[in-house]
Amino acid sequence: MTADESAPKKAPEPSGVDLARVALRAAREQARARGDAAQQKKQARRGGGLRSGARADGRDPMALGAAINRLLTERGWEAPAAVGGVMGRWPQIVGEDVAKHCVPERYDEDERVLIVRCDSTAWATNLRLLAPTLVARLNEDLGHGTVRLIKVLGPGGPPRRYGPLRAPGSTGPGDTYG
């Protein structure tokens, strides 16, 4: 075996007709690009702007789900939307018993805190004990670090009643009990 036979065979260099085909293809692509640019300039000058044609482009209508997903991504609303989905599935996440007495109110995206209101102090205490488990479950579902803390609120007090016998400067019924 000689040195010429053991050397790998190289692909033949394009020549003649092959070179002409490659050059023609490149020239056509350049002409097409120049023609597209000239056509766009002409339409812009006429005030017509770009017009949709038979081929798909970014201005064509899209499915509603795809449009909403694109909007969420562009605006950076993925985490709030995911947490909103959790609020809709709250009974499946925490269980029916807890869901009857504890309702998620809002999500603070900056602090990554989910605020939950309970209808009694007993349920608020119970949910505070369950909070680390719920945070782990929510982060497993939504992605790590989406919910950092669950803030549990007890029942709200009675609404403030302002009536004709209200003393000026008084803060309500609680100011009489020292």
Image (cartoon, rainbow, N blue to C red):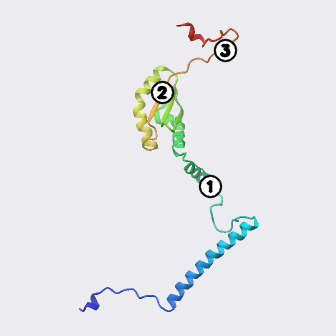
Can you identify the residue that label 2 sits on? 152
Q: Is residue 40 above or below residue 68?
A: below
Q: Which mark is residue 63?
A: 1
Find numbered disc 1 in the image and state the secondary structure of the residue it sits on. loop
Q: Residues within 10 Å of mark 1 (few under 14, many from 20)?
A: few
Q: Identify the mark at residue 19; answer none if there is no mark.
A: none
Q: Amino acid at mark 1?
A: Ala
Q: CA distance from mark 1 to mark 3?
A: 52 Å
Label 3: which secondary element: loop
Q: Position of residue 168 (x, y in %)?
A: 65, 11
Q: Amino acid at mark 2?
A: Val
- Seen at 56% across and 82% down, the residue is 25
Q: On the picture, is 84 further left or further right than 139?
A: right
Q: Could you tell me how far apart the alpha carbons at marks 2 and 3 are, in whole angstroms?
A: 29 Å
User: In the picture, which quadrant includes the N terminus?
Assistant: bottom left
Q: Quadrant of residue 105?
A: top right
Q: Looking at numbered disc 3 in the image, what kind of residue is underneath it?
A: Tyr
Q: Is residue 159 left or right of residue 126?
A: right
> In the image, residue 161 lies at what x, y percent?
64, 15
Which badge, 2 or 3, comes first in the chain's sequence? 2
